[in-house]
Image (cartoon, rainbow, N blue to C red):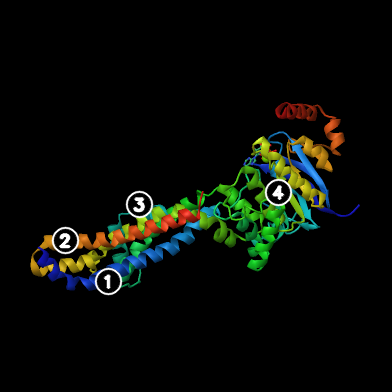
Amino acid sequence: MIEAMIYALPFLGQGFLVTLAVSGLVVAGSLVLGLVLGTALAFGPVWLGLPIRAFADTARAIPLIVLIFTVYYGLPALGVNLSPFWAAVAALTLFKTGHVIEIVRGAITSIAAGQMEAAKAIGLSFVDRLRYVIFPQAVRRFLPPWINSVTDSVKGSALVSLVGVVDLMMAIQQVIGRTYQPMPLYLLGAIIYIAVNASLSVTSRRLEARFARVVAS
Amino acid sequence: MSEPVLSIRGLTKRFGTTTVLDGVDLDVARGEVLVVIGASGSGKTTLLRCVNALVPYDAGSITLDGVEVGYTAPGSGVRRSDRALSAIRADIGMVFQMFNLFPHLSARDNVALGLKVTRGMAKREAVARAEHWLARVGLADRMDHLPSQLSGGQQQRVGIARAVAMEPKLLLLDEITSALDPELVGEVLDVVRGLAAEGMTMLMVTHEMSFARDAGHRVVFMDQGRIAEEGVPKEVLGNPRSERLQRFLRRIELRTE
Ligand SMILES: Nc1ncnc2c1ncn2[C@@H]1O[C@H](COP(=O)(O)OP(=O)(O)OP(=O)(O)O)[C@@H](O)[C@H]1O
Ligand SMILES: [Mg+2]
């Protein structure tokens, strides 16, 4: 059992890096998009909020696997040719952005309206009101659900193997194809995913504690 | 008489179909302490929020030193850009009923933020001015405290320091002592008295009638979105003409006895 795992390890390095790359790109992309769209949803006019709301709800309502296949097979039909890697990253990012929009909106609207008024009253511009008053307070509400969603992204990235991207999951299956020993390999895979997400959790708990101290209620 | 700092003409504000401000005319002269009284729902807070361009209004005009506050020109109906509104608000201080301090910032940073970001002062200069004002309101030993570590009276004094440190042309105060325990009201009103003595122009909503009497230069009584009575405090409070003001004053007295 252990031997089978040790035998497999060198073959998994490349796939592991791909998993990290997919997760990292998805997390970063959805964070940027989600911050912009979630802020627009919280403060923008209705004509801007409605499409954002519709997008967020749709993205979250579709099973991830369906979204991945739709982007993978759908984009070429529209004349856009993406490699499997980028198609998968795009699909996962859309999905994740739907969640981040909701988390950002919730964190922002949890801040009392008086904060925005006080920030206006000292003459801060919209961007400065967000930067110095709203975001520093909202971040504490934002972090716990967002970190959950980051670990979800790492787990969800395993689905990219279904469109032929050689990530950790796919690399594991390739080794199984040679050794015909699924159990040790899937166990090893589980351990690696757990290790990644456990270190994320530890980091996030540190972050949360720091922000809790900074932002005393 | 000098040009008024604040000049309000025919100010009308509706929420849906209810008219909350119904053609308000009001001038505040430089250095004047104008006290606004009136029953709950008479539109006092809405009036202040219109003056600070926190809400749009439906008709009339509000000018600060001759400049229309919320719109590009009187009656244009075109709202100013956020940048232009911010520049105007920077010259109008506001102190809130619920303090609205920034909970993540120390007392010092609450006061210094607008100085740094809005006024563009260097950090050292901004901090020095913030500390000066916190000392003025009696909080020299509380500069590093977060709002959550301060009493209500102390928080409100930080709120006042935050507003006046910007050196506004006009200070708006909305029932700034009504969320405080009775024994903390005095320390806050003393600070306001000091500002009045130094010539700060103020538009102040309060239910503290003794304060209105001895610190106010003029009192207006608002009733259903209109200014129903106005004059020197002694007249308006001591010799109310309308039945409604008489009833209002009786109710206030009962409450404070
Ligand atoms: N955002 C709003 N939407 C709808 N109605 C509002 C809104 N804000 C205020 N009102 C209404 O406008 C009227 C005046 O409210 P305002 O807060 O100005 O009264 P006030 O004189 O300050 O009362 P109080 O003494 O209770 O503070 C009230 O009837 C109130 O219900
Ligand atoms: Mg009010």
Q: Quadrant of ligand 1?
A: top right
Residue under numbered circle 1: A17
* Tag 4: amino acid: Cys
Residue under numbered circle 4: B50
Question: Residue placed farthest to the right in the image?
Answer: B1
Which mark is nearer the camera, 4 or 2? 2
Q: Is the C-beta of the residue carrying label 4 under 8 Å from the nearest atom of ligand 1?
A: no
Which chain is disc 3 placed on?
Answer: A
The tag on residue A61 is: 3
Seen in the image, is A56 located left or right of residue B177? Answer: left
Point out the tag, 1 or 3, that comes first from the N-terminus.
Answer: 1
Seen in the image, is B77 located left or right of residue B142? Answer: right
Helix, strand or loop under label 3: helix
| Place of residue B124 in the rendered image (x, y in percent of width and height, measured from the top left) | 65, 67
Disc 1 crowd, CA 10 A, few/some/many (<14, 14-19, 20+): some
Which chain is disc 4 placed on?
Answer: B
Which mark is nearer the camera, 2 or 3? 2
Helix, strand or loop under label 4: helix
| Place of residue B13 in the rendered image (x, y in percent of width and height, measured from the top left) | 70, 44
Which chain is disc 2 placed on?
Answer: A
Residue under numbered circle 2: A186
Which chain is disc 1 placed on?
Answer: A
B231 and B164: which is toward the camera: B164
Q: Is the C-beta of the residue carrying label 1 under 8 Å from the nearest atom of ligand 1?
A: no
Question: Distance from label 4 to label 2 (Cα)?
Answer: 65 Å
Question: Residue placed farthest to the front in the image?
Answer: B141
